[in-house]
Amino acid sequence: MVHSKLVYVGIVVHSKLVVHSRLAILSRLVVHSSLLVHSKLVVHSKFMVHSKLVVHSKLVIHSKLVNVVIVVHSRGPLTRKVSSPQPFFPRHSLVSDFYTGDVAKLTERLLGADLSLVVYYAPWDRDSQHLRWEMEKAARYHHEQIYFAAVNCWHPNSECKTRYKIRTYPAIVLHVRSVSGTETKALAYGGPRDAGHIIRFLSRALHPLTHVASHADLARLQMEHNAVVLGYYDFSTVKQLPRGFISYYLASLRSLQHHKTSAIAWGVVTNHKVATALSFNETRSVHLVLWNTTLVFTNAASSNSEGMSNWVNKWVDETTIWVDIPGTKSMALHSVLQKGPTLILFTPDNPYHTVNDPFTVLREISLDYSNCNQSSRVSNLARYLSSLRAKSRIQLRQAERVCRSYLQNQLHILHLSKQQFNSKDETCCGSEPSSEAGTTTGDQQSKVCDMCTHPTRTLTTPEELCTNPISWEEDSGLLHHVNKLMTVFSDSCRHLMLQYSPWEHYSVCCQRNNTLAKAKSSYIPHTPEKKEAFDVGSGHPDDRIEKLVALAAEDQCKRLFHGSLVAPHSFVKDQHPAPDITGLGCKTNKTLTFVAVDSLRHGDVAEKLGVNLTTREPQKTAAVIVDVAREAHFIMDASLSKLTLANFIINYTHGLLDRILVTGHVDTNRCKPSQICIQELTSENYLKFTQEMGKMVVVLHYSSNCAACTTVGHVFMTVAHMARHIPNITFARINILTNTLPWNLYFQTLPSIIVHPHYRKSDSSVFDSTLPLTPANLMSFLVSNLDPSHRLSLALSTCRDDCHEQVVQAAAVATTQLHHLMTVTTTKLQDVLHRLVKLKETPHEIPHWENHYQILVHTKHLLVRDIKTQRVKLNHLNQVQKLVPSNSNKLLIESDLLKSLQYIIQSKSNSKKTLESSTLHNEL
Amino acid sequence: NKMTFLFVYLQVCFLMSFSTGMTEKERIKLREEVRGMFYHAYEGYIKYAYPYDELRPLSCDGHDTWGSYSLTLIDALDTLGVMENKTEFQRVVELIIEKANFDVNINVSVFETSIRILGGLLSGHLMSKKMGVDVEDGWPCAGPLLRISKDVADKLLPAFDTPTGMPYGTVNLRDGVPEGETPITCTAGVGTYIIEFGTLSRLTGDPVYEEVAMRALHGIWDHRSSINLVGNHIDVLTGRWAAQDSGIGAGIDSYFEYLVKGAALLQKPELMAIFIEARTAIDKYLHHEDWYLWATMTKGYVTMAVFQSLEAYWPGVLALLGDINSAQKIIFNYHQVWKQFGFTPEFYNIPQAEAPVNREGYPLRPELIESLMYLYQATKDDTFLEMGADILTSIQHTAKTECGYATKQPSTCSYFLTRRTGCITWERQDKFIKLALGIVSLKLVDTSIILKLIL
């Protein structure tokens, strides 16, 4: 038997196994509950709904209908009657629906159960509407231990609405009945609103305390939790509950609100010997066992539950935590990241699973990393974690074997319900597959449609009551997991599974379960027989214990089944020993904080960081280091193991990692040559594309969420159109929201336009953002960045007929002018030469003769150069005149023109002078 | 001075919550739901209320509200375009061309006529080619709808003939500003023309519209206080402030909105410069824990700590500006209010987290959902889609009537008709649905954006 751990020693039931009994700890450890009637609970709750519910069982106020104002108008009513409240949950739901907002009645019922989960809903609220199916699922799981209720806290003038102010619907509140049984303590649940997480919360609320009977128990708690709170309460000496124990119990429940994932365990030491071994001096003292030290709460005896939980919250110190990102305004992740570089492990947090292998790896690493003074306590803990991981794998395999028949049974039920479904008509009133049906088997078939029989004609009963709350995509995922699970089953079972599709035509409105009667009358007073169990000191098991064992075993199977529907177990493959990173956190000024984020619910965070979770191994698990201060993040490429994670951290510490540049989707639409099109770049191809030699690239940096960017597209297009004849020029754009670029290409303002020139790539220049972005401005910016040859070709290519004429004319004028200039220059030259000859003849004694001579020689050189220039220009103009098609030879094709132009330009630029072409450009 | 768009590295990733995502199926379902909402309301109007301005959704009849010009029909035109209902679009265009008559002796609100009639006609004009209407040569610089727009705008122009350049609030379509008309206009009524008038100028080539709109915008800004806040109502003849409360909500709201949208649409950096200066003052004096309060314009002392449902446009404007960070923080507050009431009340007392009695109605205002649309477009974070779905669900649940959608008065849980509350409008709801659709169909739909896309 796998339940060997369940040891019956005196009053102790090991809580590793979840025992199906209402309020296990209370009913077991609270022996003399009848004596506790007068111990008052001091209730403090931050929750706005209420902290105390006092019974007024006779005060049942019927507030069903609300004032109706009808103002009669000549053409019709101005106001409409308020419709009377409608049931929100199906009639035979396991959740009692107080849809009139009758709080008094609800309170009465709450006092009939140890634990109750109440939803305060508003019928119009979408989340409330979704929550109701999750509540149904949770109720099916836990209805034997917990009373489930829902109350309409919106309907105007209802008692609930007038008594409580709910700031966000729905509010989920756990009510814990006080020992006196006259009031309840309210604990708000703020976690995810899906059945799995609610069930996890409830399971933990049922068993908030763990008995610690030996040092080994403590070690185990330490391994499974980041911190352990230990309280020593002596049950043997007194005939009633030890003082302060109730506060301790409530504090443990309270911590469920703050620590949504099981980060902190609350243990109870009852044995004097064990207490001494754990260095407890007296009863009613509380210790906080942290990873590197143990703290003692000195005021434990005099503190109430709030004081205790505050103390724990103040001193708790964890090397790694789960960061919960609620759906509401939250700075949870932000505040962690602001502290410094952070390693985020994205991994599934399956609420049905008790172990999480990747998270344990992270804990191991974080313990070593933070172990600055080489403490053996910490390194031992890390080592134990390693062995725990190995063990949990074996345990899972065992559990799969043990649960084989249970799982087969479940699948059989699925199959049966499918057959049953087929026999019905395919309307909304088809039966629901009993995939979540829990333990019941035979009575599953008797399903009744009830919500569908409600009149749907009135506007206040929208059709949404009969729609499928689970999306198809999710369903196929579930099916996939179930299929995976099937591999542990026999072949005959598997083929049933393969043809079965339970979620086809799934319809929730018709759910019906025969366990209803039981649920409604689920209040059972504190069971007296448990008391006997406590009194048996010898350790002989009786049949009740066996029953508990059986229930616990079934619960394990239930978890296995439901858990596999959510996500499979992910195990880390560890082959090689990891490098030692002990104390690394203190040897660097880039100390990391370690956090884990549930990748099932927050996969989009990972996606935004550029992590593709689907390809990861183990499933949906990835490690990312985010350094907000340095505005960089790094993704671990390798699949997660202790080795790879340690290496990743070491590489980060030594600065060996490259900043991740997030890249958007690659645009597959290639431009056709005939079209003007703007190519969409990504960070992957940006550099390759823009740095290509001989190609000029104009890039518009924009972002899809910038309003100013939406109105520059046509300007950019216009310019692209105008510049289409310039050879080797490309227009492109990049969405920097989805593409990270190197720092040198990072702009403070958008839109920005940058030009990467043809050859000298380092001379890229940015469009001046103080200028209005108009086609003219952008064009002149472009032209100023063209090298002269391209400038000329641009100029000529934009030429049409009249322009050609103008060019010819301008060229003719320029030629004449040049001829004239040349004549003038030649005359001057002759003059200078003449004077030079003269000067040579005159005696050298004339004052400043030397100077005169020098000046003349210099002038001569200048003039000669001018003449040369002018000759080249003339030559050029000649060629231009030849090139530009006059009216007679229009047939000259543009591309030919360009070709010959380029040829000229090339030869020109080879022959050192580029001046001419720019002159030409000016003339044009 | 350039239109700036701030981009802060990774900011989008970390600040806020992330949703678990929405499947394609859900998106499509939501989209179709919105489509259904639109047709429910539109067909209700056509069946029961046309040719009146608006439908009264409880009595299922029509009445005139802003003028007798089948307001809803014109206002719904671009939504038909967004819904890609070509046949109905073409039918309505013909109907408008045939029936439109603005040469009538009625007093109309300059503001409402501009945003609804002018905005509706212009966006209809610009969409008409895409909607398969046979456009005439020269489109988009010519066309029947454009001519009607010009006609309407010309009738509004007399209101702008004041010493300060700021317009009167009311004008008679035939005779210009009525005798004895009050010169007190609210700030939004002065500064909410640039998008429609600017578009008209660019399309017709006549600069006068853009000029008067710009002059009015500058008129307000020139009269700002020494700490750069603007008041609530101003005397357009003297430039004296008649109401000195400064905030971002009622009476002022669309002035800021049009500064940003106008700057982006018409590429006017000077408008953006005004907005940035104004925003600095707003953040300094009115901004408290991601809420915006009301304060005196002269000293910046807080007078009212209320959130008005009209203010919900603000995060959208910030998103357009690129300040996604602030926008997200603010919209989470506003969404919480929605979750508390099932709508955003006209007034919401921030410290007490309550809606004051008689100020808790909800005339189906589109501001919040418009902001959600911009934020979703900017971040693609499904959280905002979910918020939009929240809004959709509660509207469907409580506001739907046999022939349309009514406003909410949840204190008594009854539905009031237009005339009673004075501000419920069918076309508000129409625009609302338009924007809701924008969220789920990933389209940009606000009039100005459509203009932006086409221009």
Image (cartoon, rainbow, N blue to C red):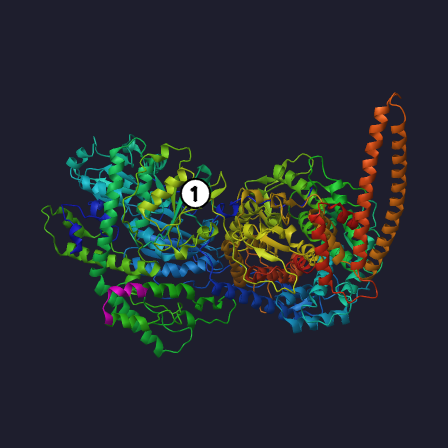
As drawn, A696 above or below A494: above
Q: Is residue B417 magenta?
A: no
Residue A706 visible in the current orientation: no
**A863 or A296: nearer the viewer:** A863
As drawn, A188 above or below A95: above
Mark 1 chain? A
Q: Residue at position x 52%, y 67% from top? A: A459
Q: Residue at position x 28%, y 72% from top? A: A495
Q: Residue at position x 82%, y 58% from top? A: A803
Residue A650 position within the rendered picture, expressed as x and y whole percent measured from the top left: 37, 39
**A491 or A183: nearer the viewer:** A491
Quarter residue A86 falls in? bottom left
| Rendered-image quadrant of the N terminus of chain A | bottom left
Residue B64 position within the rendered picture, expressed as x and y whole percent measured from the top left: 72, 64
Label 1 belongs to which residue?
A: A657
Q: Residue at position x 79%, y 52% from top? A: A876
Residue A815 position within the rendered picture, expressed as x and y whole percent measured from the top left: 86, 51
Residue A727 visible in the current orientation: yes
Quarter residue A711 falls in? bottom right
**B86 or A277: nearer the viewer:** B86
Inspect the image, locate mark 1, and give the three-letter code of the amino acid beneath it.
Leu
Is the magenta region chiefly helix, strand or loop? helix
**B129 or A327: nearer the viewer:** B129
* Local secondary structure at mark 1: loop
Q: Is residue A483 magenta?
A: yes
Q: Is residue A496 left or right of residue B193?
A: left
Range of magenta residues: A482-491
